[in-house]
Amino acid sequence: MSLLALVLVPLAGALLAGLDPSRARRLAWLGSAATAHLLLLALAWGGALERSETLWLRFDPLGGLVLTLVSVVFLAVAASSVFYLRREVPRGGRAYEACLLGFLASASVVCLTDHFGALWVAMETTTLATAPLIYHPSDRRSIEAVWKYLLICSVGIALALLGTFLLALAQGTVPGSPDLLRSTILAAPRLDPVWFKAAFVFLFVGYGTKAGLAPMHTWLPDAHGEAPSPISALLSGALINLAFLAILRVVQVANAAGQERALAPVLIGFGLGSVLVATALLLRQRDYKRMLAYSSVEQMGVVSIGCGLGMAASYGALLHLLGSSLGKALLFLVAGNVLVAYRSKRIDDVSGLIERVPASGALLLAGFFLLAGAPPFPLFWSELAILRGAFLGGQPWVAAALVALQAVAFVGVGVRIVSMVQGAAPGGEVPRGRESLWLLLPPAGLLLVALLVGLVPAVQSVLLAAAATIGGTAP
Amino acid sequence: MTALLPLALLLLLAPLLPGVAARTVALATGRRGAPVLQLYRDLRRLWGKDLVYGAVTTGVFRVAPVVWVFGAVAAAAFVPLDGRSALARFPGDFLLFAGLLALGRFALTLAALDTGSSFEGMGASRELLIGGLAEPVLFLGFLTLSLATGGSSLSELFGTGVGDAWPRVGATLVMVALSLAMLLLAEASRGPIDDPATHLELTMIHEVMALDHSGPDLALLLYGGALRFALFGALLVQLVWPRGAMGDLAAAGRLAAGLVAVAALVGAVESSMARLRMIRIPQYLVSAGVLASLGALLLLR
Amino acid sequence: MIPLSEAVLVLVLLVNFAVLAASRLTFTIRATAIQGVLLGILPLTIGDPWSGKSLLLSGGTLALKAIVLPNVLLWAMREAAVRREVEPSLGPIASVGAGVLSVGLAQALSRNLPPLDAALPRLLVTASIATVLSGFIVLMTRRKAMTQVVGYLMLENGVYLFGLILAGRVPLLVELGVLLDLLVGVFIMGLVVFHMNRELESLDSARLSELRD
């Protein structure tokens, strides 16, 4: 069996779900496709799936890592979609499951493809597949969110296309036909530095828009805040990582061509900017979903800084990517539970979670600790690795800035989350609810995976291998 | 003597052009229209009439039509009508060209103000608005051509230099030609800047200035207007259809044919567009300027 | 006189200015259609006009950019009963001035980049960057959502121009994928615009300001 199965299975599921009029059956297609995808990934890790020439699919540690993350988050999202769709009767109808599976298929292509052109097409497809999902509530605020999302991300992706062309040109000015196959470029890099610099700028800004790096992040709080909670979890836990993977592919090319010195300032600069902007705006948030969305911007910024610093910090960056995505997905799913229980998105309206919906309250706190970098969660080690990389690389001020900003963010988010969890439950309309298992299992599962990520040695070796491909070393 | 032939041809053909344009408009709108040679007949008829001057007018009013025609004829001396060289040339003569045309317009405007009539005053201010914006655009076009051909006199810009400039910097020349075409419509007071067939004073720009002139003065005014039309048309023809290796007679024929074609095109444009609102005219002229500067930008290599 | 490809590129630049200076929405949409026609002709003027790849690309571009996309936008406009004016926050003269600056910038950039293949018109890089910048200007200074889509289309046209430099060296699958993505993207945008009109009785995206910090 070839890697193409990872693309075809979700695609087939999307077609079947799109044509099926029964809601229950559609959810069944969704669930089975998601599970099948994860199983196929297990086979791929074992080396049982072979490369595919259509779409130029190859399995490498970095791509495999991100795809596994996406698949796990997707499974959790699919599971909680069951409950979400039971509650919400959307105006559109059938598109939800089909769009989700379409997203999964394109995500597989993004992670596995060797060809920068196919990478671009798949990335744009993920934008298009998720747009109807964000609009699912069909109200005024989600229209605004989806418009900003569609326009800003499409413009960003158009710039990334320009960057892709520039990348091809960067090799083409030397005789021989230019290629967009990453493996070919990596094997024999002959990049014209001027063209490559231009290519990198456009690719970074373009894909960075999708990844949520400041100042291109303006669509993110709206989209992640207004989308239905499972979709927010998908966006923060999976989509922005795909975009950053695209950036990392370019970093791989740069490292092979010896251009990494030129990229580091860009990565670190935009990363620090993102952390700064996110922290500043985080403190002003009164809507807890938007607060979580800004936290996603911050997490991307930290990952970018880590990749820019190189050496030990690359490992830390990848671990941070993994851990924070899982944590963010978990938090968004729990936020969905909170929304169901309290029917308000404002932080002020929510309190006494631990009394009314204790399991959700506990999960919320756990998720917060995960994000804050408390041991034994993986973010503890990742932060350490990044700081170590900063000091080893002779840029202690980056480490200092990072620590300071993250401390501020920790206090800001912490205060809000604690206020939501503790305190007296307002009013008496909603009695101590019976929390549906569908609402609790997915986030709990994500929490468990996050714990394992930090502790299981197999994951460590994969992370190290992936970090090596972007120029990192062991922490 | 043969050097004067193209100039004589231009002076002779000038009144034909408004006729061709009007005929084209009529045909395009489904009418038969006036004969093409009508303006010649009008000029002869007007020349035989009496002069009538308003009571408040001064010498300015009497002199203006002559200055108007003089400006146009003198400017024609600097245009390389035979495709190679003009009757008179010196580096930077395009400034004099523009200045002579401006002198004519200035005299006409003064005469219009001299009548003390409100309509003519309105026409004068409008005419100066257009003229004031058209002149810098003309200079932009000349400067771009100078950069493209490397010359500094009209004879080089529109004569000898153009032929070999086309394969080299064709895109720029296209831009300048478009800009000149837009200017032609403005300077000759044709549509969509100014409707020559309107009879409503409030919509007139150039015609209203001719309201108070009579007889031979009016004939001079009409002839001068036709001559300006022909001048810009000649510039356009020289730019778009360089002489190359043609003989003298062929070059003259080229000039005549080109002028008639330009007039027909003007008629076609006029029949397809309504007159622009006053507020759009500055935008129109700025667009012409943009085209010329675009041509200049494309030269940066 | 001048090579056909250069003439087409000059026309592309002129269409940019037409869109920047326009004040009526339908005109901007038709102008993008014209630009689509020009871009469809362009592959045939560069390199071998009769190769299957050129014909396919040219045909696909013509069908998409000149016919399908403008009609999608016009359909959305009709369904949503959009008002005709463009409602810019930057007036036409200032927009055109910005357009001139963008051409100047594009020209300067194209001089500083290393030279291309001799078979390609020198104007290609300039036209491409200028169109991208003009698309940006339209995107950022127009308040109506529909005009922002037009700006996005111009941006994509500019990127497409750049892609022509690689004509023949990018796999057909990728080029078709790009076109398909564009189609679906604009289609979805049209749908969103339609829904937007249903939800808020206007397409003025300046009114989309409820979500803010």
Image (cartoon, grey):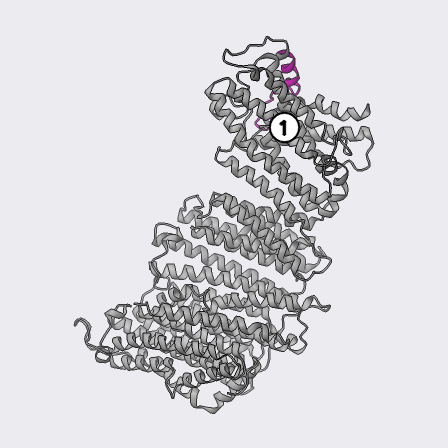
> Residue at the left extreme?
A428
Say few, some or many: other residues with alpha carbon within 10 Å of mark 1 (under 14 / 14 to 19 / 20 or more).
Answer: many
Mark 1: which secondary structure?
helix
Q: Is residue A135 above or below residue C27?
A: below
Instruction: Point out residue A243 in the picture as x, y percentages from the top left corner.
Output: 50, 71
User: Dividing the picture into quarters, in which one does residue A77 lie?
Assistant: bottom left
Q: Quadrant of the N terminus of chain A?
A: bottom right
Residue A266 seen anywhere in this rendered image of the structure: yes
Which contiguous range is marked in magenta?
Answer: B27-45
Q: Residue at x 63, y 64 (%)?
A: C172
Q: Nearer the viewer, residue C193 or B295?
A: B295
Instruction: Point out residue B92 in the picture as x, y percentages from the top left corner.
Output: 70, 36
Q: Residue at x 50, y 27 (%)?
A: B125
Instruction: Point out residue B287 in the picture as x, y percentages from the top left corner.
Output: 56, 41
The answer for which chain carries disc 1 is: B
Q: Would you say residue B35 sits in the magenta stretch?
A: yes
Q: Nearer the viewer, residue A26 or C203?
A: C203
* B71 sits to left or right of B55: right
Q: Nearer the viewer, residue C156 or A416?
A: A416
User: Dividing the picture into quarters, in which one does residue B142 lie?
Assistant: top right
Q: Residue at x 54, y 14 (%)?
A: B58
In this figure, what is the number of numbered marks? 1
Instruction: Point out residue B263 in the picture as x, y percentages from the top left corner.
Output: 65, 29
Mark 1, residue position: B101
Q: Amino acid at mark 1?
A: Leu
User: Dividing the picture into quarters, in which one does residue A179 lie?
Assistant: bottom right
Q: Is residue C186 above or below residue B197?
A: below
Q: Is residue A305 above or below residue C152?
A: below
* A118 sits to left or right of C43: left
Residue B200 seen anywhere in this rendered image of the structure: no
Q: Would you say residue C15 sits in the magenta stretch?
A: no
